[in-house]
Image (cartoon, rainbow, N blue to C red):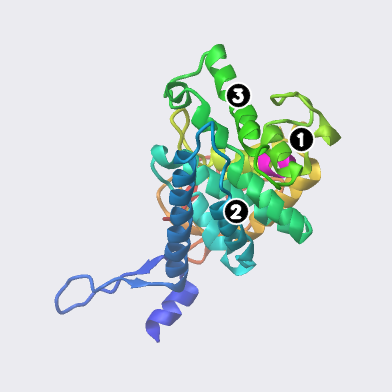
Amino acid sequence: LMIKKIIEFYPSNTIYIYTNEKKTIAPTIQTPEKQSFIKTENLLNHFSNNIYEFLESIDGNSKLDLTEIRTMSKEVLDNNTNNYTSILKSITNSRTIDEYLTRHSVNVAFLSSMLGKWLKLPQKDLTLLTYAAFLHDIGKVKVNQKVLNKPSKLTKLEFEEIKKHSVYSYELVRNIPYLDEAVSLAVLMHHERLDGSGYPLHLKEDRINTFAKIIGIADTFDAMTSDKVYSKKQNPFKVLEIMQHEGIATLDYYYLTTFIKQMLNYYTGEMVKLSDNRICKVVKTDINYISNPLISIDSIFIDLKNEKDLFIIDLAP
């Protein structure tokens, strides 16, 4: 009973019990939140392994088999909103750089489907959107791997090589029999931006596929909250704030605003780690100061907007 009360009032991933007699730590008791996270992490890792096998099977002479993509897409869409908190925490969880391509595809599929649901897309569109999200980066298997994994700054020519991946992805996807054209167009256009600054076609506004606009938002968020060979991850609050400011001219305003507001709803109540290594709870977020929410530590409320030297560095482990 005491443990349940502690969990209720002081949420944490684990509860440690100290005994006076032996002066040792008793076995860790996992909270329901931790159990849910582990289950979700296992599911997303399983999907990541499936994507790895799918990418390994790609060659220039055979048609892509979407059986596994369809199965995973159904599982993604069957996830209810009660599990979104665990999914979002798993998506931003630190992992090895080598996992980036496969896990990125899985993360973008979940994020895109979530945004699609928040936008109230019809079921058929949600399915096609999730297919496209899983497939959006498969063309990277045809990019020079030394360039793709280069740890230092890319040259202009190397960046042009990287940018070819969306065309490669399109060429692979468009030849899949009986697959709606919207999927291949989304794959082709997921790096297009409303102001024409994107690639490969420099399209603007309404000429960009709807699914591509959604995937572009999900892709940006996951890329910025992940460790890559050329950049370190940032905490999700900071990323959402950057996207809010920098995405005004490049990302669909309604889609982006919906994404940010819904994400903040799920992050409210989450435990985060501060720059002084303390763990605190997010009590309230402010859409105008996303990276500086109201937090609580030991029943003391702190408004990070008023703190110059205190800030969030990540979600709590």
Q: CA distance from mark 1 to mark 2?
A: 23 Å
Label 3 crowd (10 A; few <14 / some 14-19 / many >=20)? some
Lateral position of residue 45 relative to residue 20, left or right: right
Report the front residue among 37 and 303: 37
Q: x, y percentage for residue 317? A: 41, 55
Residue at 66% over, 54% down: 113
Tell me where the magenta segment starts and ends, as one range. Answer: 211-216
Q: Secondary structure at mark 3?
A: helix
Q: CA distance from mark 1 to mark 3?
A: 23 Å
Give residue 14's quadrant in the image: bottom left
Q: Secondary structure at mark 2?
A: helix
Name the residue type under label 1. Answer: Ile
**Count of picture labels:** 3
Q: x, y percentage for residue 210? A: 78, 43
Name the residue type under label 2. Answer: Phe
Numbered mark located on residue 248 in the image: 1
Residue at 58% over, 40% down: 63
Report the front residue among 5 and 58: 58
Q: x, y percentage for residue 62? A: 54, 37
Numbered mark located on residue 163 in the image: 3
Sequence-wise, which precedes: disc 1 or disc 2? Answer: 2
Residue 306 visible in the shown view: no
Quarter of the picture holding the N terminus: bottom left
Q: Residue furthest front?
A: 61
Sequence-wise, which precedes: disc 3 or disc 2? Answer: 2
Report the front residue among 170 and 84: 170
Q: Which residue is mark 2?
A: 110
Sequence-wise, which precedes: disc 1 or disc 3? Answer: 3
Name the residue type under label 3. Answer: Lys
Numbered mark located on residue 98 in the image: none
